[in-house]
Image (cartoon, grey):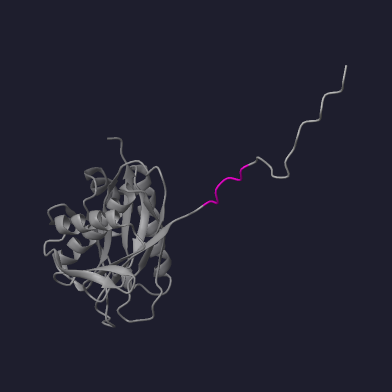
């Protein structure tokens, strides 16, 4: 029997390398007292964010256009310099935008301050993931004035349990600030504390985190979204945005 010919081989391997891993990042940032800029988000994401602004922010959008390579919304009013109930509405706006982006797969990776301007605010950096995370409920906690904590659109269970967990040592009064917003007034002035009291304030925050976790909430972001303009009487504290996973 004649020997069989050897199989033919080519010098090129049939192995196909997997495509390179790609990660997409984008940013949302607040500027001046009324500007909101979106950088490297797909147009359909910016469209959804526009819808969110128009549905949540009472004044809507004055105008929009390109600023550098970003899409800029100039909002009516001055949300980043607002006081009183308007400041609470501005916090609702940011929480709603975080929720919109999260539902489309854009998950917050980092919020950072990259400016030394006295009117600076945080830049929020997002990473895209597919599929998008599970739907969530959103709320905000604002550290207001020098002695107040405002619970914005948070569940009634947290509104009841959090003051109890903090205790009478801290809590002076609990009241409704406005519809959907519960205000806790503290003894003393924790947000301008000095000396050893600064560590007591941090213990307060740890207690707050524990109470939130027990009710199914976890902190998603802590954002500086207000411009003090160098005014020592204007709060420079962050707004905390807890999130609670929900099955819908």
Question: Which residue occupies the foreground of this view, 14 or 92?
Answer: 14
Residue 139 as seen in the image, left or right of residue 200: left
Residue 193, quarter of the rendered image:
bottom left
Q: Main secondary structure of the magenta part?
A: loop
| x then y, percent, for residue 179 | 12, 53
Please state the total of marks drawn on the protein image.
0
- Which residue is farthest top? 1
Q: Residue at x 28, y 54 (%)?
A: 44
Q: Is residue 17 magenta?
A: yes
Q: Residue at x 86, y 23 (%)?
A: 3
Question: Which residue occupies the foreground of this view, 71 or 83?
Answer: 71
Residue 126 as seen in the image, left or right of residue 155: right
Q: Considering the image in quadrants, where does the C terminus appear?
A: top left
Q: Is residue 172 above or below residue 13?
A: below
Residue 16 as seen in the image, left or right of residue 124: right
| x then y, percent, for residue 175 | 16, 56
**Residue 164 visible in rendering:** yes
Residue 235, quarter of the rendered image:
bottom left
Task: Give the magenta range.
Answer: 16-21
Residue 198, quarter of the rendered image:
bottom left
Q: Is residue 9 above or below residue 209?
A: above
- Which residue is farthest front? 2
Q: Is residue 8 above or below residue 103?
A: above
Q: Is residue 231 magenta?
A: no
| x then y, percent, for residue 64 | 20, 69
Q: Is residue 158 above or below residue 239?
A: above
**Residue 176 visible in rendering:** no
Question: Which residue occupies the foreground of this view, 173 or 157?
Answer: 157
Q: Residue at x 32, y 59 (%)?
A: 240
Q: Considering the image in quadrants, where does the N terminus appear?
A: top right
| x then y, percent, for residue 237 | 32, 69
């Amino acid at each position: 029997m004649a020997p069989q010919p050897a199989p033919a081989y080519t010098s090129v391997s049939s192995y196909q390398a997997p495509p390179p891993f790609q990660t997409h990042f984008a940013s949302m940032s607040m500027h001046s007292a009324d500007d909101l800029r979106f950088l490297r988000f797909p147009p359909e994401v910016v469209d959804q964010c526009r819808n969110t602004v128009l549905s949540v922010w009472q004044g809507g959008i004055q105008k929009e256009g390109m600023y550098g390579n970003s899409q800029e919304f100039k909002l009516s009013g001055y949300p980043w310099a607002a006081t009183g109930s308007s400041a609470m509405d501005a916090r609702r706006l940011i929480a709603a935008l975080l929720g919109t982006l999260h539902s489309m797969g854009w998950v917050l990776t980092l919020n950072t301050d990259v400016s030394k301007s006295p009117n600076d605010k945080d830049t929020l950096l997002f990473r895209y993931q597919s599929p998008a995370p599970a739907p969530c409920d959103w709320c905000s906690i604002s550290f207001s004035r020098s002695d107040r904590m405002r619970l914005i659109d948070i569940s009634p269970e947290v509104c009841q349990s959090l003051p109890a967990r903090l205790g009478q040592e801290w809590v002076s009064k609990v009241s409704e600030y406005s519809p959907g917003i519960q205000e806790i007034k503290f003894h003393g002035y924790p947000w301008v504390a000095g000396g050893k009291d600064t560590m007591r304030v941090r213990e307060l925050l740890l207690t707050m985190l524990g109470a939130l976790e027990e009710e199914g909430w976890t902190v998603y972001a802590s954002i500086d979204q207000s411009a003090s303009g160098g005014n020592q009487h204007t709060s420079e504290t962050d707004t905390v945005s807890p999130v609670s996973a929900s099955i819908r």
